[in-house]
Structures are given as C-alpha cells and as structure tokens.
Image (cartoon, coloured by chain):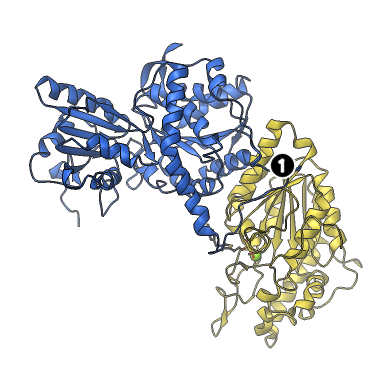
C-alpha cells in the first residue's frame, strides 16, 4: 500500500511485518524513532515480541544475541557511538553465526560529538563478518530489511545482516513508498526454523574456545560464506523482485546510465539520489556520465564493480567516511576491484564528502566531476572551508 | 561414575574450586537449564573446541555480557512460552561480575529477568594470570597488587557485591562456599524455585592463584568461612539469614596456607588488620553461634 511516511516509521512497520520475537535497543539519535515505534507496537499488542529496555548498546546487542540463540528471530537498531559500544558484540554475533538483523542509522563519530549523518560508524565494524547493505531511499530500506532476514536465515548463510540508512536524510525524511502487506511478507519470509539453537532436548555448546588448530578454518568458513553470498544475494533480490514487483539492480550493485558512461561515480546510500541528478544534468549537456551504486558493501562485489567500470575512462569514488591516515574505505575496495582490469583500468579518483552532516550539494558532486580531468587524487576532501583550517596552538 | 551435567575431562587445574562448584550448581539446577557463561577460567577449561563438558545448552559470548545474554535467552524462552519449564543461569568469575560485568548485571536485576546469576569468586582475574579484581581481598598479593617495600598488596576491601545485588530489591541473594557442597546445592534449588533475578556468590579457592596446595582446596574454603573472612549468608527477600560458625578461628589459620598472604605472616599489624575485617564480618552478619 502506498504511504507517505517517515523513514524510521517505515522501518518499524516493516520490522513488525517480519515478526521478530525479541527486540532490544538503547536510544541514540537518529535511531530513536524506529525503536520508539516498535515499543508502542508491543504496548498495543500489534507486535507480539519481548521488548527489552537495556542499560547500554552493549547489552542491547547481547540481549538480541541471547534471543536469537534460542532460535527466535530478533532485532536491534543503533547509530554512531552506540554501534561503537556494541562493536565487541557485533563481531561476536557474526562469529557465533547468529542470523540477526540490525538497522544502523548512519551518523558521525565523536570527537567532536556530532549527531549528523556520515558513514563512519559502520566502517568500524566493516570487518566483523556481517553482511552490510546500504539503502539509497526509504523504499529501498524497507525492501532491504525483508531481504535481510531472508538472507541471514538462509541455511547456506547463517550470518547477521545490517541495513544501513543515512541518519536524518533517510530516517527522518518523508517519502511516498509502497509498504507490503503482512500476507506478502509472510509469504516471502516464512517463520525462522533452526536446529542451531539452545534447546534442552538437544543441548549444544555455543561459543567455544578455539585454539590455533581450529581458529583459522572457522574464520575461513565465514569468508567462504561471504563468497557464496555473491550468488545468494542476487537470487534473493530476484525472488524479491518477482514477489513484490519492484527493485533495481542485482542486489549487489545498481547502475544508472552506466552502460555507455565515460565518467562514473561510485557511491553508497542516499547520496546516490543527488548523484543521479548530477548525472542527468551532465547528460543534458551531452556528457556521458553514470553512477554505480554499491548496495552490498560486505560482501564486496569485486567482479560486478570491475565489469561495471571496465569501459569507463574516469571514475570518482565518493566516500562519506575515511580511514584516517589512508583513504576512503570504498575507494580502497573499488581500487582493488579495478586493479583486475590491468591496463584497461580507468583513471581512478577518491573523494571524501559530507562528514558530520556537511551538505552534499549538486555543486560539490560537480566539483568531484571536474577534478576527474586534472591531477589524479586519491583522498580529496570536497568543500573544505580554508578559513577554518588555521591551527590553534 | 556419578551422573553429572558437567562432564570430566576438562582442563581445569588440579584442586580448582570453580570446577567443583560449577558441577554442583548445574547438577542442582538439572537438565532443564540453559547457561550463559562469561569469559574466564571456567569457560576456557570446559569448552575447548571441539569438546565441551556441558550436558545442558550453554552459550559463551563475551567477558562482561553474560547477564545480558541470559536476559535475551530468557526473553526468547518467554516468547516461545517455555520460560516456566526452563531455568536460565548466567555465570562468571569475580572480575566478570563485580568489575566489567557490573553494569549489565545491574540492568538484568533492574529489569527483573527470571535468571539466576552465579559468581564464582576466586578473588582475582585468574584466567589472565592472577591480577587484582574488585573482589580481591585486602592485603592479598596479586600480580597487579604485588607486595613490595612500599606495599602490603591490595589496599582495598572486597566490593560488597551481595549488598549491591540486594540493593536492587531482588528476591534472593546468597553467598556460599565450595567448602559446603550441600549448602551450595540447597541455595541453587531454593533460588531457582523463586521467580525473578537471583544472585549467588560462591567462594572458590584457586590453588594456582592463591598459592596453596591443590589438596587443600576444601580446607582452605572452610577456613575462610570459619575465620569469618568469607561470611556465608542469605538475603531472603532482604532478610539476612547468616550461616552460623560454632568455633570461630583466628585469621592466621586461614592465611597461613596461602602464598598470596605469606608476606603478612611476619607482620602483626597486618594480621591485626585482617582480624579486624573478620571481626567486623562476624558482627555485621551475626555469624557467631555462641553470641
Ligand atoms: C573486554 C575484555 N577485557 C579483558 C579480557 C581478558 N580476560 C579474559 S578472562 C579475564 C579474567 C577473568 O577473571 P574472572 O572473571 O575473575 O574469572 P576467572 O578466570 O578468575 O575465573 C580477563 C581479564 C577479555 N576477554 N575481554
Ligand atoms: Mg576470578
């Protein structure tokens, strides 16, 4: 059903339709509206779940870990400092192979404290083993949550999935979107059934100590699952498209006017919307620009990215986070992907935009475009106010 | 062989008090029990992949979060409508309880989860090599509170963890000692018969960390109780019920068997200080059977 709805409300609504049995969260801007909504749904018996109000994000993640370990579909959501506080548990959940789903309302990291959007928070758990998906719109956020549970609980996968949505821009943005019905979601996402759970009839030990004789293989198996996910994600995305009659791309990436593009932007999340506008403007002027949107950041679809960029002349990778002392994380990954193109490799440029909620305007995206033809850059900050860069010693 | 839910063949040290107490706890709880275990010696010596001593569903996540994991397990069981027939136990060492896990435990108590929390108190971070914790006793020599020319060891008293638990208004709090196995099992059964959060703290000698002979585990445990240095009591809905001592012994009787207190034995002032702690416990908890 078409609804004009805030992003957070839409996420809460779709989570309700996914029927989690345990929900636990700790408030942090801009995640709050999602969990407030879920709390109210439980209070009104619209959602039959245990809602556990915890004393920290570390415990929120631990509670849903515990819930999921009993074989009950569970859910949490967080943001920024909350995700960092959770980090230890986030890694642990993936290592335990528990198929949780979490929403991260992406936000900047302190210090200085800043509640606005960028994508630095998720990068701190980039290497945790979670599947990391990025939504461009609230419709996509809704759709990715349903697919997230489907993917996570797939017997071939059994890994947690995080749906990233840009804080405020999406979480607090109003959008007309198509909310599926309970019947549709139930049909796509059957109840979670597993034998990998705490069960007094079949007492399992979960969370062993693994010494050097075993640890390497156990970690390898997570990496191997991520490799298989490069096939499984497109299958699930395809099933979703058939069932819900919408969805662009192959679940891993999505191209926009990319087939004949000479200059390609690569980006993740809501910024892709603005980039589409810039691409249209450039096309109107006869410039062959295009966009490659990365939906699945982990697993990183190396082959898709390489083939999508194979005929480009110049590529601008847009990062909304940075590995301080090195480069934007997306830039680094895209570089590895295109390195397989050898001498066909396009001219690659890396840009950092929008940290701490600085507006990413069409002008700033055009800035990156214009710099593609000059001196090659790998980590260029766009929109710096030079007058603020005086050192205060 | 005795039927037990905590199978032998694990890698605990000889004379490990925690291994004995853990077996007593789980056997008292029975097979319809799920355990969330914090990181520490017990977890390490009982679940070295691919082997496990546990005959019940058991999960280890991290050092400080077993109470939050247990809260989630309880919530999952409630959702499944199975909570009434299954016990949930969260358990960890003294460090995992009184220090790094305290916030999560407080959250679990405050939320009222139907979980029994068991703290195995060996009075230091043993798994990492005998560092001081908030439950390390006064003047104990540990690797991070060593005695030296300017120090007599750990300068601070034990954190009053049972009182901290009781202050949450939870229905049952108890201390116990591996020197009194039946008392442990009675308390576990009593705790599990009560709905809501429960806390049991069990004194478990560690031959390696306390530097006593492995065969002395039971004697050392008993002496801690008989000297008044480890008071055994219950707070049953807040009401104090002490385990009385018939013949109270001087603290040297307990201290002399342990390397961690060796530096005190030639220091009458230090012994006096230790005796004062015992005397205070005896008064505070009403431990004397004759008074
Ligand atoms: C966050 C974190 N900090 C530190 C450690 C290292 N560590 C593992 S076990 C342990 C000591 C455990 O002490 P205690 O809880 O008293 O249990 P014991 O081993 O003495 O039975 C420590 C410090 C860890 N695993 N995780
Ligand atoms: Mg200890």
Q: How far across and down, in percent of the image, does residue B190 sit? A: 84, 48
Q: Quadrant of ligand 2?
A: bottom right
Q: Does B12 sit above or below residue A257?
A: below
Disc 1 packing (10 Å; few <14; some 14–19; many ≥20)? some
Q: Which residue is mark 1?
A: A199
- The one of B20 and A280 positioned closer to us in this rendering: A280
Q: Residue furthest bottom?
A: B266
Q: Does B238 sit above or below residue A16?
A: below
Q: Residue at x 45, y 17 (%)?
A: A244
Indicate the quadrant where residue A153 lies.
top right
Q: Residue at x 60, y 38 (%)?
A: A68
**Whether residue A108 is visible:** yes
Q: Does B284 sit above or below residue A124?
A: below
- The one of A276 and A30 positioned closer to us in this rendering: A276
**Whether residue B243 is visible:** no
Image quadrant occupied by the C terminus of chain A: bottom left
Q: How far across and down, in percent of the image, does residue A255 sit? A: 27, 28
* Side of A316 where A58 appears, left or right: right
- The one of B238 and B142 positioned closer to us in this rendering: B142
Tell me, what hue is chain A? blue
* Side of A314 where A157 appears, left or right: right
Mark 1 near ligand 1 (CB under 8 Å)? no
Q: Chain of mark 1?
A: A
Give the secondary structure at mark 1: loop
Please count the marks in the image: 1
Q: How far across and down, in percent of the image, does residue A203 sit? A: 72, 47
Indicate the quadrant where residue B130 lies.
bottom right
Q: Residue at x 23, y 30 (%)?
A: A291
Tell me, what hue is chain B? yellow
Q: How far across and down, in percent of the image, does residue A79 sit? A: 43, 38
- The one of B164 and A256 positioned closer to us in this rendering: A256
């Amino acid at each position: 059903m078409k609804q004009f709805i805030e992003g957070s409300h839409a996420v809460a609504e779709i989570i309700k339709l996914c029927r989690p049995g345990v929900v636990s969260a700790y408030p942090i801007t801009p995640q709050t509206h999602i969990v407030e909504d879920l709390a109210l749904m439980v209070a009104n018996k619209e959602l039959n779940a245990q809602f556990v109000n915890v004393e920290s994000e570390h415990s929120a993640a631990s509670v849903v870990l515990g819930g999921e370990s009993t074989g009950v579909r569970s859910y949490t959501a967080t943001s920024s400092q909350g995700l960092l506080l959770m980090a230890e548990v986030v890694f642990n959940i993936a290592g335990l192979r528990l198929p949780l789903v979490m929403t991260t309302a992406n936000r900047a990291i302190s210090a200085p404290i800043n509640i606005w959007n960028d994508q630095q928070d998720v990068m701190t758990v980039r290497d945790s083993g979670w599947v990391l998906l990025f939504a461009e719109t609230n419709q996509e956020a809704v759709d990715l949550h349903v697919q997230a549970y489907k993917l996570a609980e797939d017997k071939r996968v059994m890994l947690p999935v995080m749906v990233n949505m840009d804080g405020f821009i999406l979480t607090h943005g109003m959008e007309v979107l198509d909310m599926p019905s309970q019947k549709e979601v139930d049909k796509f996402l059957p109840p979670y059934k597993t034998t990998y759970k705490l069960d007094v009839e079949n007492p399992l030990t979960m969370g062993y100590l693994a010494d050097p004789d075993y640890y390497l293989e156990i970690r390898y198996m997570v990496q191997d699952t991520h490799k298989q996910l490069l096939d499984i994600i497109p299958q699930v995305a395809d099933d979703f498209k058939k069932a819900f009659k919408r969805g662009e791309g192959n679940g891993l990436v999505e191209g926009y006017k990319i087939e004949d593009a000479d200059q390609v932007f690569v980006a993740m999340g809501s910024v892709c919307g603005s980039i589409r506008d810039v691409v249209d403007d450039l096309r109107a002027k006869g410039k062959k620009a295009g966009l490659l949107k990365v939906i699945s950041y982990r697993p990183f679809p190396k082959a898709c990215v390489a083939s999508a960029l194979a005929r480009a002349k110049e590529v601008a990778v847009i990062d909304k986070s940075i590995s301080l002392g090195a480069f934007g994380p997306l830039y680094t990954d895209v570089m590895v992907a295109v390195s397989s193109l050898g001498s066909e490799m396009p001219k690659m440029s890396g840009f950092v935009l929008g940290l701490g909620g600085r507006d990413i305007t069409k002008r700033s995206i055009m800035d990156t475009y214009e710099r593609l033809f000059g001196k090659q850059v790998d980590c260029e900050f766009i929109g710096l106010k030079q007058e603020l860069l005086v050192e205060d010693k | 062989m005795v039927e037990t839910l905590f199978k032998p063949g694990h890698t605990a040290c000889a004379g490990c008090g925690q291994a004995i107490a853990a077996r007593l706890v789980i056997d008292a709880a029975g097979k319809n029990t799920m355990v969330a275990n914090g990181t520490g010696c017990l977890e390490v010596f009982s679940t070295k992949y691919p082997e496990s001593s546990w005959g019940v569903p058991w999960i280890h996540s991290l050092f400080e979060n077993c109470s939050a994991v247990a809260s989630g397990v309880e919530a999952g069981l409630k959702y499944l409508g199975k909570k009434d027939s299954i016990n949930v136990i969260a358990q960890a060492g003294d460090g995992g309880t009184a220090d790094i896990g305290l916030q999560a435990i407080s959250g679990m108590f405050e939320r009222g989860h139907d979980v029994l929390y068991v703290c195995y108190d060996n009075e230091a971070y043993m798994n990492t090599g005998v560092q001081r914790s908030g439950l390390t006793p006064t003047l104990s020599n540990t690797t991070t509170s060593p005695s030296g020319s300017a120090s007599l060891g750990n300068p601070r008293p034990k954190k009053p963890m049972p009182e901290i638990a009781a202050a949450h208004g939870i229905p049952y709090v108890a201390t116990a000692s591996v020197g009194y196995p039946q008392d442990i099992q009675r308390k576990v059964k009593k705790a599990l018969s009560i709905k809501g959060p429960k806390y049991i703290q069990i004194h478990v000698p560690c031959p390696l960390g306390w530097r006593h002979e492995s065969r002395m585990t039971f004697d050392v445990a008993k002496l801690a109780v008989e000297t008044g240095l480890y008071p055994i009591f219950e707070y049953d809905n807040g009401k104090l019920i002490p385990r009385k001592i018939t013949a109270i012994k001087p603290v040297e009787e307990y201290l002399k068997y342990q390397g961690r207190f060796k530096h005190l034995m030639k220091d009458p002032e230090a012994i006096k200080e230790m005796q004062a702690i015992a005397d205070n416990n005896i008064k505070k908890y009403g431990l004397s059977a004759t008074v």
